[in-house]
Image (cartoon, coloured by chain):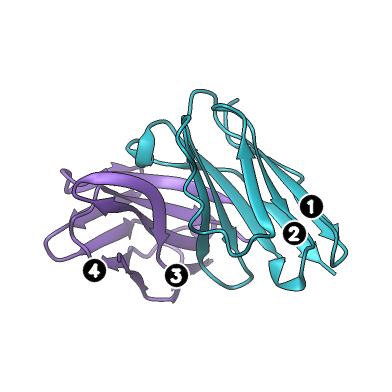
Chain colours: A purple, B cyan
């Protein structure tokens, strides 16, 4: 059974800092990995999707890397802004023999606060 | 539609009443999922629909919970005889391909409060 852990649980940084959020998973036979952000009281917004064959994906100030062999993904946020404050979640679909079964397993999230 | 639409956005109900939550997935998305998020907790899988296949109901917490989907369109999640522990945000997601090969798009959720 896939288990997903995110570290740190919470992070508070001043505006402008570069930061790294970590996601680790126990079963390296993954199909893909997706990073989301969740604002308080809201649904999830997709940030980046990394397929198992990829090592990284970039979107604006966000860069996500994937190292399947070590069971890790990192989300790098450059030049953080107060608007980046949210909970960041990584998620992986259940996987068996290379076929995704759709159900996502989520980490518990990292609560990010960027203060001016 | 442009995104996954859920209604109502908020629902307050009395303990023991039945509630229906609705999800309109993105047009053309064959897969649809329901998740639950209790206050301060992570997302909990409830049910997964893929095309005309039998749904994966393995996450439904009790027989008070049921869900239906009309073809590859709207889904409704029904909770009968609601209990206070059912209070949560119920999130719906859809994906273009089975198993989320192209990622998942979530709705804004329905916040259910059972009083």
Name the subunit of mark 4: A
Between A15 and A35, the residue placed more toward the observer is A35
Q: Residues within 10 Å of mark 3 (few under 14, many from 20)?
A: many
Q: Which mark is residue A26?
A: 4
Residue at (46%, 64%) from the top-left corner? A15
Pointer 3 residue:
A108
Q: Which of labels 4 and 1 is toward the front?
A: 1
Q: Which of labels 1 and 3 is toward the front?
A: 1
Pointer 2 residue:
B112
In the drawing, does residue B100 fall left or right of residue A24? right
Q: Which of labels 1 and 2 is toward the front?
A: 1
| Sequence-wise first label, 1 or 2 | 1
Q: Position of residue B92 (x, y in %)?
A: 58, 46
Residue at (48%, 30%) from the top-left corner? B52
Q: Position of residue A52 (x, y in %)?
A: 20, 47
Question: Does residue B82 lie above or below B56 as drawn?
Answer: below
Pointer 1 residue:
B19
Name the subunit of mark 1: B
**Residue situated furthest right in the rendering:** B14
Q: Residues within 10 Å of mark 2 (few under 14, many from 20)?
A: many
Please indicate, yes or no, whether residue A42 appears anywhere in the rendered image. no
Between A81 and B27, the residue placed more toward the observer is B27
Q: Are marks 4 and 3 on the same chain?
A: yes
| Sequence-wise first label, 4 or 3 | 4
The reply to whether dot 1 and dot 2 touch (C-beta < 8 Å) is yes
Label 1, label 3: how far apart the Cα atoms are: 28 Å
Residue at (62%, 61%) from the top-left corner? A40
Q: Which of labels 3 and 2 is toward the front?
A: 2
* Quadrant showing the C terminus of chain B: bottom right
């Amino acid at each position: 059974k896939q288990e997903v852990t995110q570290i740190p649980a919470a992070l508070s940084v001043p505006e402008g800092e570069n930061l790294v959020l970590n996601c680790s998973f126990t079963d390296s036979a993954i199909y893909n990995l997706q990073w989301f952000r969740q604002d308080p009281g809201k649904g999830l917004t997709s940030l980046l999707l990394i397929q198992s064959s990829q090592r990284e994906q970039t979107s604006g100030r966000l860069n996500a890397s994937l190292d399947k062999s070590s069971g890790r993904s990192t989300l790098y946020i450059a030049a953080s802004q107060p608007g980046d404050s949210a909970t960041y979640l990584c998620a992986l679909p259940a996987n068996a023999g290379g076929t995704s079964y759709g159900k996502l397993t989520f980490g518990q999230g990292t609560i990010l606060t960027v203060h001016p | 539609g442009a995104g996954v639409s859920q209604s109502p956005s908020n629902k307050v109900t009395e303990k023991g009443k039945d509630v229906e939550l609705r999800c309109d997935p993105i047009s053309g998305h064959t897969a649809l999922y329901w998740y639950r998020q209790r206050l301060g907790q992570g997302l909990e899988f409830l049910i997964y629909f893929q095309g005309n296949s039998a749904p994966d109901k393995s996450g439904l917490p009790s027989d008070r919970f049921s869900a239906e989907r009309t073809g590859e369109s709207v889904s409704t999640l029904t909770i009968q005889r609601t209990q206070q522990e059912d209070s949560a945000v119920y999130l719906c997601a859809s994906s273009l391909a089975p198993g989320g090969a192209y990622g998942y798009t979530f709705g804004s959720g329905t916040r259910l409060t059972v009083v």
